[in-house]
């Protein structure tokens, strides 16, 4: 059961598909868009941005998180991730670790080009994750 209503899920899907349109992916041609919803209902879009050095690329999920955090947001409900294909893509390992910083209970919607989706909880995708709670207190 999702924390979001069906209309909220559909709106997040729409935002992720719109974000995908801004992808800068001249090398892989693999466009990805993400839409991240905060606890207060604000949505931040992100897209993947590639770089000729390859290692300098950033995924759509992290782009959305960086935009939100840079504007003072730290608590999130859900993220939708969309690509150009009708295959459910999941966030890469770096993105999973990055998202874990802000909560293991984050809902993730894997969105196909035809708007169908699957839902997961971050903790299920990254079991036994290392996070802030694993660091000693200073």
Image (cartoon, helix red, strand yellow):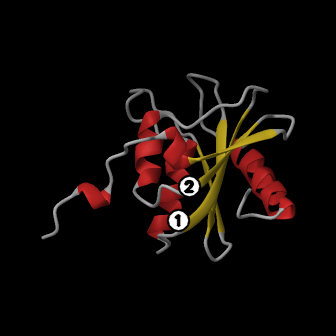
Left or right side of 136 for 112: right
Q: Quadrant of the C terminus?
A: bottom left
Q: Name the residue: 64% across, 27% down.
A: 30
Q: Residue 23: x and y, percent?
A: 64, 40
- In the picture as drawn, the residue positioned furthest to the left comes out as 138
Q: Name the residue: 41% across, 45% down.
A: 97
Q: Residue 85: x and y, percent?
A: 76, 26
Q: Residue 14: x and y, percent?
A: 81, 52
- Pick the residue in front: 29 or 109: 109
Badge 2, how many Cα within 10 Å: few under 14, some, many 20+? Answer: many
Query: Which quarter of the figure has residue 87?
Result: top right
Query: Which quarter of the figure has residue 119?
Result: top right
- Mark 2 element type: helix
Q: CA distance from mark 1 to mark 2?
A: 6 Å
Are the residues at dot 1 and dot 2 in contact (C-beta closer than 8 Å)?
Answer: yes
Q: Is residue 108 above or below residue 27?
A: below
Left or right side of 121 for 93: left
- Mark 1 element type: helix
Q: Residue 52: x and y, percent?
A: 44, 27
Query: Which quarter of the figure has residue 33?
Result: top right
Q: Is residue 15 above or below residue 33?
A: below
* Residue, disc 1: 68
Badge 1, how many Cα within 10 Å: few under 14, some, many 20+? Answer: many
- In the picture as drawn, the residue positioned furthest to the top comes out as 28
Q: Is residue 37 above or below residue 118?
A: below
Count of all numbered marks drawn on residues in the image: 2
Q: Name the residue: 21% across, 58% down.
A: 135
Mark number, residue 64: 2
Mark number, residue 98: none
Q: Quadrant of the N terminus?
A: bottom right
């Amino acid at each position: 059961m999702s924390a979001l209503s069906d209309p909220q899920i559909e709106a997040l899907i729409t935002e992720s598909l719109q974000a995908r349109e801004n992808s800068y992916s001249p090398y892989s041609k693999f466009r990805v868009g993400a839409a991240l919803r905060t606890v207060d209902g604000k949505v931040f879009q992100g897209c993947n941005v590639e770089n000729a050095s390859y290692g300098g690329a950033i995924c759509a999920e992290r782009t959305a998180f960086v935009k939100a955090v840079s504007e003072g947001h730290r608590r999130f409900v859900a993220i939708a991730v969309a690509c150009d294909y009708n295959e459910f893509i999941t966030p890469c390992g770096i993105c999973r670790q990055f998202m874990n910083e802000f909560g293991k209970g984050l809902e993730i919607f894997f969105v196909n080009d035809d708007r169908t989706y699957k839902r997961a909880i971050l903790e299920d995708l990254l079991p036994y994750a290392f996070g802030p709670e694993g660091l000693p207190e200073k």
